[in-house]
Amino acid sequence: MFQTILTLLYILLVLTVVIVILVDTGDSGRKFAWLLIIAVLPLVGIILYFMFGINYRHHWIFNRRHQRYKDVFEKQTTPGLNTLLFGHSEEEKVREDFRPLAKLMARENYPTVTSGNDFEIITTGERKFELLCRDIQEARESIHIEYFHFGNDESSRMVKGLLMQKALEGVKVRFLYENVANFPINSRYYADMKKAGVEIVKFTNPRMHILDFVNTVNYRNHRKVVVIDGKIGYTGGMNINDHYFKKWRDTHLRITGKAVASLQYAFLDSWLTGKGRIDRNMAEYYPMVQGITAGAGQAVLCPDDRAVDYRNIQDTLKDKLVQIVPDEPDLPYPILQYSYEWAIHHARRYIYFQTPYFVPPEPVLNALKSAAMCGVDVRLMLPEVADNILMRPANRAYYEEVLSAGVRIFLRQGEFIHSKTFVSDDYLSSIGSANMDARSFDLNYEINSYIYDEETAVLNRRIFLSDLAECRELTLEEWSRRPWYSRIIQSVIRLFAPLL
């Protein structure tokens, strides 16, 4: 009798989970992958689904975690700060045909377009290391630093040492890291920083309540953000370790101007959501509300189609429109995915992408194919070999489909390309942390910068053309000759691609 009851409860549990998956409004491919796992391994599949599969957008668990930041911000904000972060007047400065995108990404609690920004596009790890170390050394009040990967190698220890030095000097140093991604690093590594006065928060903390941990372990903080004295910001694709500083090809931004307020907003969101503390009124972390310190340097001009030597770019682009777009599962819409869909659908001449991982959700995949079939020059720059063994066949599982539609694929040889960028129609540029995959669009905490400017877009196009010198173009004819067993592996991996 007892065994019969257990069997009935087990069947009821399986049926309930299956119904929950079917009624979920998420990606159909992702739902199918979970149904397949549960069909093969019912009990294990159900446990994994509760840990990694539930879509927590609109969910009370995330809303509860996020509410702490909302409460503090709403109590301590000022009209000027609200206007800077969420006002819509600057959107009118965006070119009319791209204005709907700016409005789309400024809905709900997403930051708006800001003007008066100066920035440098950083295309080598050496340059980022040089600038970041200099700015840390010159910090006077605060250093806010948030990274997915912060390594324990030569470059990382040098940055760590500078942070400890500034904390000892009395600068407020707040260090937030993704604990799951940095799990191999011994806790003593962070203990040294704490002794020096660095405040440290683990974003995904195994010591949190077990129910919270189980329900949030799949949602990683993939952002790369630094804000120094509330006036200088860094964001983009580069983490902190030797791979990024010495080996890989990646793209990052150093920004001064009003957009730094949006980076500060995103950092403090992560900091308080991760149970960090602040010691001042929220509005005091935004000096740009009272005034902005303009950046230095000369504007770089890119009047033609020639490739540019991106390794020597050290000029500052001045007075640009920038929109910082943080996305996270706390918020109701996958806004970065929507922005990619919009940009692809509205491209008229060209749209060029760089991404290390290409596992696009179905709407993005269809947008790429339809744009190419309409005659838009759609190009993807991907690594020849991904750094993640599972992502190698996953990336390749989509090649034949997009090549057949007319999308051009360029495979980077040699050094791994980790850039997450796109540029379109000599006006819209994006540089950020989000890959073109379901994890970045729906699960991770990400942050992208959108730049509305002709000069910047032309420069980014020329950087892309320069990178082509390190690539080989993959043709449909060549790809059609791949071995039969590769086709099988790629087809199987594609079934589970939405879960990677």
Image: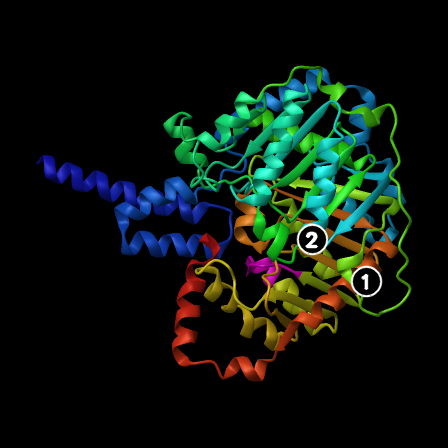
User: Which picture quadrant has residue 491?
Assistant: bottom left
Q: Nearer the viewer, residue 466 or 101?
A: 466
Q: Earlier in the sequence, mark 2 or mark 1?
A: 2
Left or right: 123 with respect to 152?
A: right
> Residue 110: x, y in percent?
70, 36
In the picture, the quarter occupied by the N terminus is top left
**Residue occupying the point 70% across, 72% down:** 469
**Mark linked to residue 372:** none
Boundaries of the magenta span: 354-365
**Mark linked to residue 425:** 1
Q: Confirm whether residue 331 shows in the render.
A: no
Q: Amino acid at mark 1?
A: Asp
Crowding at dot 1, Cα within 10 Å, few <14 / some 14-19 / many 20+, comes out as many
Is 216 situated above or below 352?
above
Report if residue 184 lies within the magenta region.
no
Left or right: 276 with respect to 339?
A: left
Q: Secondary structure at mark 1?
A: loop
Q: CA distance from mark 2 to mark 1?
A: 20 Å
Q: Amino acid at mark 2?
A: Thr
**Residue occupying the point 79% across, 63% down:** 309
Is 200 situated above or below 457?
above
> Residue 293: x, y in percent?
87, 31
Q: Nearer the viewer, residue 131 or 378?
A: 131
**Residue occupying the point 53% across, 42% down:** 151
Nearer to us: label 2 or label 1: 2
Q: Which residue is mark 2?
A: 251
Report if residue 360 lies within the magenta region.
yes
Labelled pair 2, 1 in contact (Cβ < 8 Å): no
